[in-house]
Amino acid sequence: MTGSLAQLGALLALRWQMARTPGLRLAIVLAALTVLWLLHLVVGSGDLLDAPTLATAIDIAPATFFGFGVLAVIAPLTAGGGNEVVPPDQLAVYPVRPTTQFFGGLLLAPLNLVWVVQLLVLAGLTSYLTLDGSLLRGALTTLTYVLCLTISGQMLAWFVVGLRQTQRGRRTVSAAGIALLLTSIVAVRSGHGNVVLDRSPTRSVTAAVIAGGDGHLARWGTTTVLLLLLAAAATVLGARTCAWALRRPGDLGLNRHTDPVRRRDAKSSALRELVATDRASVWRAPALRRGGLVLAILPGLIAAGAAVPWDSMIVLPGLVAAGAGLLFGVNAFCLDGSGAVWLASLPHDPRLVARAKAIVLAETVLAAVAVAAVAGSLRSPGAPTAAQLTAIAASGITCTALVVAGGLKMSTKRPHRADLRGPRDAVAPPGALAIASARLALPAAFAGLLLGSASQTGAWWWPPLLALPLVLLAVLSVLRSLRRYDDPFVRARIVQTVASG
């Protein structure tokens, strides 16, 4: 354990040295300080609430804690065991211990905007639940719950990684995932979601938070100690599960037939060929394929299960679009990989490469937004007004345009090397992804809130009218990125970075 912690410290120091730009280091420090400042503001907001709002906070607390638990389990599953401090291909000659990799994934778990937002929400709820009581005891229970679920999620993710090394294991995982998905859909459609929530352990956790604030030490101490013991057990089991998963030999490619490769039909233009190549690159990369499937299913399922009101559906496209943009949009040229040099040498207009990336990114983001909006609308209460429908459509188009514009801008200014061959490969370093998530989410959230306010006027034409200038600004940003890619020096830097680092 001590040796693994020492290795983790060395890897973090190496990662810090790899951030050679002073501005990047300053941004990382400022981001950490901003999160701490937001925590301070949220914790101190309990005194500003009235009695009805506090009663509502108590009612929604179990569901909020349950939502964090779902996120803590799904996030490492989609990342194939969690993020890595340093890419494995850069540490091939160094004996990094599996326990070090497990702890590194745990340490990088907060580098996720949704995780941070959920933590802020839990901190605010803890402040509300312990109003006029001991905030320290309630916060300790919440902290142990966060640790327990985060560590357990990492442990489960490594267990799934180990199972998927064999064909039988992959079939088992797929069958279990389909069964869980169908069960969730049936529970949502039959109205049994509240029954599941009533029987979830999060009610005991929220009761322990309230008991800690009120001074009922027996109930508070029992739950908190139990969470600590579960977190400790998950740490030990997770480290061993990670070692087991990394030791298992994979059987991919061992039993494949030697059938001829099926080629795609020739396209009618160079742009269509490049678009087809980029689509295939997204689907072939294990990390992108898994993330795309999650984006296609999870947001809509959550929206349908929560019966999101029509007013909130206007904000939903911004959240989904920002998540879809992180799939590969913030480093879109990494889809070319080592083939970037070959593509750059082909006799076609260089701008077609960037246009193809923009088209594939727009398709991905718009598809995720459309699926989430359609699925969420199935159980939204009541009938929507014309203004709400136009606001939802305008929000989807606007947020897609803003995310595509932001992704292309970051892709041309700060490209990264990413092989995307393994299940844990990411399109950019964890710190860069954390900053990019904020840069994508903030404009999209602003657009959703603006159009949501416009829908309150009741005029159906007002949301599209407000969305038009935002879409035009996004289009101008995309055109600037395309012109930037036309510069041979900029293009050479991008090709060199994504091809060889």
Image: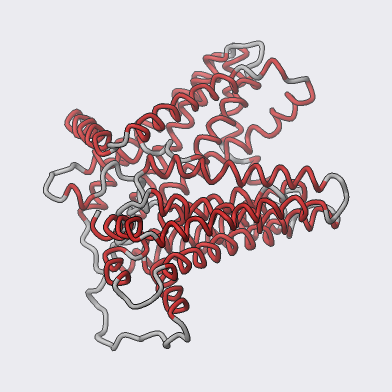
What residue is shown at x 63% (from left), y 58% (from top)? 372
- Quarter placement of the N terminus: top left
Q: Position of residue 264 (x, y in %)?
A: 40, 85
Left or right of 56, for residue 445: left
Quarter-of-image position of residue 83? top left
Q: Position of residue 188 (x, y in %)?
A: 67, 55
Q: Position of residue 31 (x, y in %)?
A: 45, 30
Among all residues in the image, which is located at the extreme right? 458
What residue is shown at x 79% (from left), y 57% (from top)? 389
| Colour treatment of the image | secondary structure
Q: Nearer the viewer, residue 355 or 111?
A: 355
Left or right of 323, for residue 203: right
> Can see residue 383?
no
> Can see residue 42?
yes
What residue is shown at x 26% (from left), y 44% (from top)? 86
When the figure is inspected, residue 218 is found, relative to residue 104, above or below; the finding is: above
Q: How many marks?
A: 0
When the figure is inspected, residue 213 is found, relative to residue 329, above or below; the finding is: above
When the figure is inspected, residue 372 is found, relative to residue 96, above or below; the finding is: below
Q: Nearer the viewer, residue 329 or 87?
A: 329
Among all residues in the image, which is located at the extreme left? 93
Left or right of 135, for residue 82: left
Q: Position of residue 369 (x, y in %)?
A: 62, 58
